[in-house]
Image (cartoon, rainbow, N blue to C red):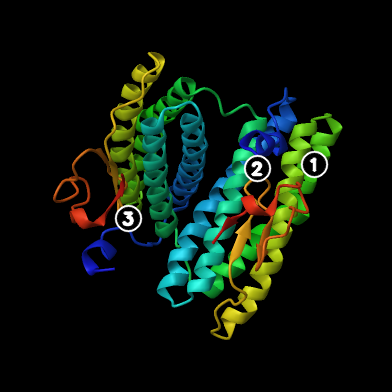
Amino acid sequence: MTDEVLEQKLPKPEALNAMTDQSLHAAFAGESQAAEKYMVFAEQAEEEGFPNIARLFRAISFAETRHARNHLRVMSGINQTADNLLVAYQGETFEIEEMYPAYQAIAKFQQNHQAYRSTTFALKAEQDHQRMYAGAREAALQGDDIADQPVSVCLACGHTVVGDVPDKCPVCAADKKYYRTFA
Amino acid sequence: MAEPFKNTPPKPEKLGAMTEECLKAAFAGESQASQKYLAFAARAEEEGFPNVARLFQAVAFAESTHARNHLSVMGGIGGTVDNLKAAFGGETFEIDEMYPAYDAVAKLQGAKEAQTSIRYAKTAEKDHQAIYQATGAAAQDGKDLTGGAIRVCPICGHTVIGDAPDECPVCGTAGQFFKTF
């Protein structure tokens, strides 16, 4: 079975009426959240000494990512890379300019210190992402790939850096050994 | 993992209702961003942009760390027995209510591809529901899961414990393409 044969089996983009579109949006949200939850549950199972339950959570998380991708495809949410980069850039921009500042203000008002930290960590990383996506879109519009450099992510706060990893995370101060590198 | 990192992620706390609502929405947003970026990474790879693909993968992972942090602050990470119960409950809702309702709408509106996408998901959620139920019962007695490798169809998400079938019973994909955990 070639990639093309496999591709034939995937649900395809189609013109959708509003209510079906709404269903798929909600299903995409549900599958995405299940996939994230199960990855976190896998770590917890690992810590508790259940390595096989951890593996189960990881496998089912992967299954949910297949469903999320299928729903996104049918909604025509996966396009050419230059366009995907624009969508990604706009999503980050919304989170930076509106979503997280609003959530931070509420967390501050309600004196929820941990929620404030969690939203601040995210907001700072989204600024890295916004900048990286802007640069990558410029390149992709010219038909160019970006430079061949590792990208590393802080396991605690999501700080994202291209190239060398700092000794300490500038956002949450985690040591450099707690970065995951995409080499 | 050593203490410095363990102490760094945000911790569970008692939340005001509005703050909790924010974190729920932020968890939904981060989860969806992560899945989108993974799909975009696969597309970039196909188009011959391996470094853009890597960027999407790394940023998807960063969004996952944010999703985890928000979930943690909301007290959404329990012990494994409770997590299995929560997972079972989520699958049950999707099987009994969510996907049947969405399927009815897609049928009414003649959306064929949407029906396929919904059928793939709903069928796999039944696998997951059964596995989570059995696993939860064992975990309650302190027992880990048995049965060996877990295999997932990369097209429809069909999930089996043990050997992959020759052909996926849901979508017909050859067993050799199943992803093994």
- Placement of A176 over or under B133, stated as above or below: above
Query: Which quadrant of the structure image shows residue A162?
Result: top left
Question: Which subunit holds the residue at mark 2?
Answer: A
The disc at residue A27 is: 2
Q: Which amino acid does label 1 sit on?
A: Asp
Q: Which amino acid does label 2 sit on?
A: Ala
- Eye-nearest disc, 1 or 3: 1
Local secondary structure at mark 1: helix
Q: Mark 1 points at which residue?
A: B103
Q: Mark 3 points at which residue?
A: A114
Left of A54 or right of it: where is A31? right
| Label 1 crowd (10 A; few <14 / some 14-19 / many >=20) | many
Left of B134 or right of it: where is A101? left
- Eye-nearest disc, 2 or 3: 2
Local secondary structure at mark 3: helix
Local secondary structure at mark 2: helix
Residue at coordinates 62% horizontally, 75% vertically from top-left? B147
